[in-house]
Image (cartoon, grey):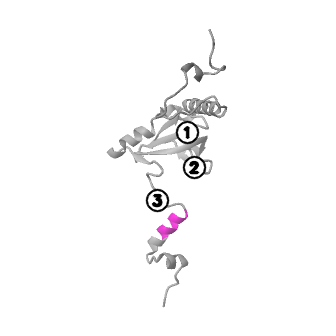
Amino acid sequence: MFKPVSLKTTLLGLQDTTAIEGEKKIMSGGGESDKKKLNVYNINNEEDGESIKKALGKYTRIEDRHIDLIPSNCYLRYICKETGECKYGGKVLKHLEKNNEKYILVTRYHKYFFSIRKRNRIFFVRDDEEGKLEHEEKITVYRLFKAGKLKLVNDEEECTMEPCQYFDEYFYEES
């Protein structure tokens, strides 16, 4: 007389099988993702224009004929020509081909691995040289601070040191 009810239906209070299937899909990780969380923007949406410019600010467009030359360990973004969505790809691992279709294997945080079809995509690659230089500068400043060669001064405080006292023997050359 009564249909057997699963534990999930009892806990969630869902009666509709399509809702249950949708909930199963979301709980297993294959459901709809929060697009703003993953930084998915659409070029057809005027509201996303500034976000796309900001997201692609440090990226360089790769011509279609040079897609096979994208090196591994560089970060990738792409725009789908069919849907107009601008997505973050991840770090490139390698290029592969299966079933006469070319793909790029990428990873996110070395936890998620997936492939991106090369056809009907506009690819953008981030140049990490500027980021590496900035990172090295930060490390140098931090080491100088830890060694006591830099002093943190608040904007409200007046500095009592002379400009020549900011330099030590490593940076100050006498003429």
Against 3, residue 103 (above or below) is above
Q: Gap between marks 1 and 2, in whole Å?
A: 14 Å
In this rendering, the answer to whether 172 lies above or below 24 is above
The numbered mark at residue 75 is: 1
- Amino acid type, label 1: Tyr
Quadrant location, the C terminus: top right
Q: Which residue is drawn at 49% across and 38% down?
A: 123
Report, in whole angstroms, how far the alpha carbon at label 2 lies from the one at label 3: 17 Å
Q: Give the range drawn in magenta.
A: 21-28
**Residue nearer the viewer, 124 or 149:** 149
Give the labeled residue for mark 3. Answer: 32
Sequence order check, earlier mark of 1 and 3: 3
Q: Quadrant of residue 18?
A: bottom left
* Residue at the outermost front position: 160
For image coordinates 66% across by 20% down, the residue present is: 170
Mark sitting earlier along the chain (1/2): 1
Q: Residue 114 carries which label?
A: 2
Question: Circles 1 and 3: CB distance less than 8 Å?
Answer: no
Other residues around mark 3 within 10 Å, as few (<14) / some (14–19) / many (≥20) = few
